Image (cartoon, grey):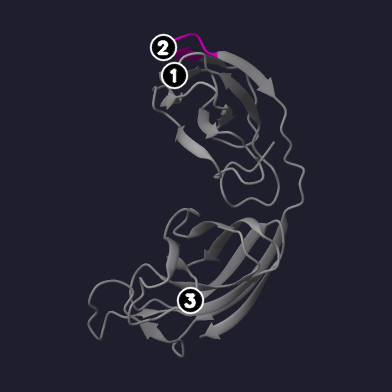
C-alpha cells in the first residue's frame, strides 16, 4: 500500500508496479479493464511509493470510460518504464487486466517496491487575523481587495521530496520562495505555488530540495479580505522547522 494522493500519513491505497519491456520505440497505449475504479501512472526509470509525483510521465483516471484509465505515451527502447496500477478510492482490492497496443508487443514484469521508508510529519498552526499584513496577490488590487498573508521560514535539515499542505476552513493559497519574498513583486524568487491540490480548497505543494537550508512559505487566501486559522502539515524524509516571519 501507499499514499496515492499527496497528503497521507498512513498508506491507504493498494498498487501494483509493473516494469514495461519495450522492444521497438514508438507510441503505445495502455488500457485497464476491471470492476474496480482504476487509476494508472506511467513512470520513467524509477517509482518510489514514498514520493509518488517524482518521475511521472503521464497519469489517468477515466480516460477509457467505465472508470478505467488509458495512458498513451512515446516509449524508447533501452529505457526503463514502470506502470503503476492502483485505484481511485482507498482500501480497494480486485483483479485487473492491462492491454497494450502499439508498434510491438510489450513485455510486463511485476516488480516489488516498498513504501516502508520512514516518513516524518511536521506541523505548524497559526491564523490570518486583522493584525496580519496584506499584499496584492494577483494583478492590480484596489484598497478593498488586498490579501492577508503569513510568511514563514521553513528550514530543511534533510534533502529529499516533501509535501507541504494546508488544513483550514478558509480557501488557502500557498507559495514557496527561495532567496527572499517581495510583496511588491510576488512573482520574484517564487519556486512554486498551488491552490487546490490538497482538496477541500486547500493547497498542497510537492517540493524537492537538493540543499539543506531555508525557504519561505507564504500562506494566503484565494479570495481577498479573508481571515481565519490554518495549519501547515509537511511529510518528508526529515522534519521541517517553521519560523514565523510575518503575521
Disc 3 vs disc 1: Cβ atoms closer than 8 Å? no
Q: Nearer the viewer, mark 3 or mark 2?
A: 2
Q: CA distance from mark 3 to mark 1?
A: 53 Å
Instruction: Please give the range of residues in magenta.
Output: 99-106
Q: Nearer the viewer, mark 1 or mark 2?
A: 1
Residue lying at 65% horizontally and 40% vertically, measured from the top left = 48
Mark toward the start of the polypeptide (3 vs 1):
1
Residue lying at 49% horizontally and 79% vertically, measured from the top left = 150
Residue 87 numbered mark, or none: none
Disc 1 vs disc 2: Cβ atoms closer than 8 Å? yes
Q: Quadrant of residue 125?
A: bottom right
Is 177 in front, or is 225?
Answer: 177
Is 6 in front, or is 154?
Answer: 154
Q: Which residue is mark 1?
A: 25
Quadrant of the rendering where the N terminus is positioned = top right
- Say what secondary structure mark 1 lies in: loop
Q: Which residue is mark 3?
A: 228
Q: CA distance from mark 3 to mark 2?
A: 55 Å
Label 3, residues with CA under 10 Å away: few <14, some 14-19, many ≥20: some
Seen from this angle, which residue lies furthest top?
A: 105
- The reply to whether residue 213 is visible in this rendering is yes
User: From the viewer's perspective, is residue 53 above or below residue 176?
Assistant: above
- Say what secondary structure mark 3 lies in: strand
Residue lying at 59% horizontally and 43% vertically, measured from the top left = 52
Amino acid at each position: 500500500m501507499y499514499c496515492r494522493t499527496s497528503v497521507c500519513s498512513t498508506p491507504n491505497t493498494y498498487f501494483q508496479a509493473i516494469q514495461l519491456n519495450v522492444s521497438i520505440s514508438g507510441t503505445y497505449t495502455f488500457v485497464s479493464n476491471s470492476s474496480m475504479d482504476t487509476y494508472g501512472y506511467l513512470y520513467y526509470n524509477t517509482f518510489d511509493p514514498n514520493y509518488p509525483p517524482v518521475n511521472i510521465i503521464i497519469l489517468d483516471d477515466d480516460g477509457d470510460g467505465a472508470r478505467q484509465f488509458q495512458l498513451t505515451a512515446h516509449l524508447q527502447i533501452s529505457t526503463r518504464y514502470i506502470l503503476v496500477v492502483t485505484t481511485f478510492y482507498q482500501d480497494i482490492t480486485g483483479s485487473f487486466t492491462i492491454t497494450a497496443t502499439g508498434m510491438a508487443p510489450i513485455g510486463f514484469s511485476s516488480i516489488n517496491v516498498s513504501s516502508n521508508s520512514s516518513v516524518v510529519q511536521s506541523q505548524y498552526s497559526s491564523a490570518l487575523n486583522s493584525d496580519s499584513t496584506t499584499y496584492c496577490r494577483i494583478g492590480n488590487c484596489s484598497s478593498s481587495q488586498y490579501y492577508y498573508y503569513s510568511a514563514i521560514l521553513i528550514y530543511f535539515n534533510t534533502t529529499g521530496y516533501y509535501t507541504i499542505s494546508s488544513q483550514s476552513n478558509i480557501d488557502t493559497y500557498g507559495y514557496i520562495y527561495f532567496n527572499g519574498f517581495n510583496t511588491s513583486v510576488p512573482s520574484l524568487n517564487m519556486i512554486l505555488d498551488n491552490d487546490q491540490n490538497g482538496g477541500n480548497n486547500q493547497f498542497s505543494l510537492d517540493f524537492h530540495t537538493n540543499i539543506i537550508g531555508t525557504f519561505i512559505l507564504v500562506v494566503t487566501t484565494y479570495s481577498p479580505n479573508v481571515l481565519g486559522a490554518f495549519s501547515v502539515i509537511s511529510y518528508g524524509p526529515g522534519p521541517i522547522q517553521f519560523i514565523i516571519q510575518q503575521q
